[in-house]
Image (cartoon, rainbow, N blue to C red):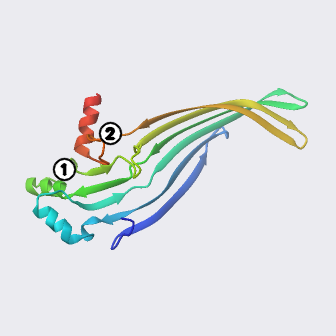
Amino acid sequence: PSALWPGIVQDYRFRGVQSFIPEAVRLSKEWDRKYGLQLYFLHNTQDKIVSLIMGKTIHIVGVKFPAAQISLSTEKNIPLWPVPRILLHLETFSAITFDIGEMVLTSKSATEAWKTGNTANLHNDLVLRVKNSDGSPRYIVTFTFTIGAGLRLDLFFVDATVMVSIKYELKFAFSPLHANEQLMTFGEMSYQLAQAG
């Protein structure tokens, strides 16, 4: 549900750029997404109590994490011709993006921890949303690398660049055990990682 009450929702934005030597290399960090605390147990409380009595698992509390990206970019101009000034322009861009999304504490997770007296058991049955609302996979980690090269013409009031670039992307997502599911527990994800070697 979009309405959170009594919950906490904030819109957190932070952007920073730090320059290194040489100046053409830049490292940037970016967080840009709403994050907050979702108190599921306060929504349709009567239905949730009935579900618990019937032995069903319900969502208790959800925490939404902001997406984060760390990127590194470089660029360099190499003179090829003095007049008109023609430069060979080279640039690269690499980034890693983390998009965990929402993590949910379930009644099963809380019950197991209470029965055993071990809070470490909360971990196995924590739930993570691994698909978006439209059914597409949620890529938790994305690696991006782009390399470009071109010619730059600098003549009086004309500064034109013609570029060709190649982009590579490596995306990582979990696949639910059943195609129609959007959620997975950490125990299921650990099992998938173990099976993948």
What amino acid is labelled 2 in the image?
Answer: Ser
- Judged from this view, the residue extending furthest toward the bottom is 6
* Residue located at (10% from left, 63% from top): 53
Mark carried by residue 186: none
Q: Amino acid at mark 1?
A: Ala
Asked if disc 1 and disc 2 are in contact, CB closer than 8 Å, the reply is no
Which residue is at a point 22% across and 71% down the rendered structure image? 45
Q: Which residue is more in the foreground, 111 or 42?
A: 42
Image coordinates for residue 64, horizontal then vertical, percent: 37, 58
* Tag 2 residue: 175
Q: Where's the N terminus, which quadrant?
A: bottom left
Residue 154 x/y as whole percent: 85, 37
Q: What's the residue at 41%, 45% (across, down)?
A: 136
Q: Is residue 16 left or right of residue 36?
A: right
For discs 1 and 2, the disc positioned in front in the rendered view? 2
Residue under circle 1? 120
How packed mark 2 is, by other alpha carbons closer than 10 Å (few <14, some 14-19, many 20 or more), is some
Res 176 quadrant in image: top left
- Coordinates of residue 50 in the picture (x, y in percent): 14, 66
Q: Nearer the viewer, residue 130 or 34?
A: 130
Residue 80: image location, x then y, percent: 81, 26
Tag count: 2
The residue at the far top in this view is 80
Identify which residue, 152 or 81, lies in the foreground: 152
